[in-house]
Amino acid sequence: KECPKLRNSNNHGNQGGRNNAPTRVYALGRTGAGPDANVVT
């Protein structure tokens, strides 16, 4: 469930372009926390 939602977030970051790469890793780490997923939403 969180996987697809995270992808959507990445799309928004696409605007930044370069930020997209770091944002992906950052978001992934946050997802591991669990409660962080709520923040992404």
Image (tube, helix red, strand yellow):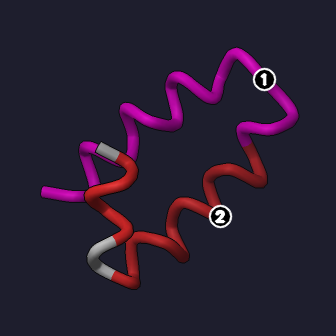
- The percent coordinates of residue 37 (x first, y second) are 31, 62
Q: Quadrant of the C terminus?
A: top left
Out of 5 and 36, give the one closest to the viewer. Answer: 36
Q: In the rendered image, which residue does mark 2 sit on? A: 25
**Residue 7 falls left or right of residue 27:** left
Q: Secondary structure at mark 2?
A: helix
Q: Which residue occupies 65% across, 23% down?
A: 14
Which quarter of the picture shows residue 35?
bottom left
Which quarter of the picture shows residue 13?
top right
**Which residue appears farthest toward the left when viewing the image?**
1
**Residue 13 falls left or right of residue 4:** right
Out of 39 and 9, give the one closest to the viewer. Answer: 39
Q: In the rendered image, which residue does mark 1 sit on? A: 16
- The percent coordinates of residue 7 (x first, y second) are 39, 40
Label 1 crowding class (10 Å Cα cut-off): few <14, some 14-19, many 20+? few
**Which residue appears farthest toward the bottom when viewing the image?**
33
Q: Which residue occupies 22% across, 58% down?
A: 2
State the mark number for residue 27.
none
The type of residue carrying mark 2 is: Val
- The percent coordinates of residue 25 (x first, y second) are 65, 64
- The percent coordinates of residue 34 (x first, y second) are 28, 79
Out of 21 and 27, give the one closest to the viewer. Answer: 27
**Residue 17 falls left or right of residue 12:** right
Main SS class of the magenta portion in the image: helix
Q: Is residue 5 above or below residue 24?
A: above
Tell me, yes or no, whether the highlighted magenta stretch contains residue 40. Answer: no
How many numbered circles does the render carry? 2
State the extent of the magenta-drawn residues as a range: 1-20
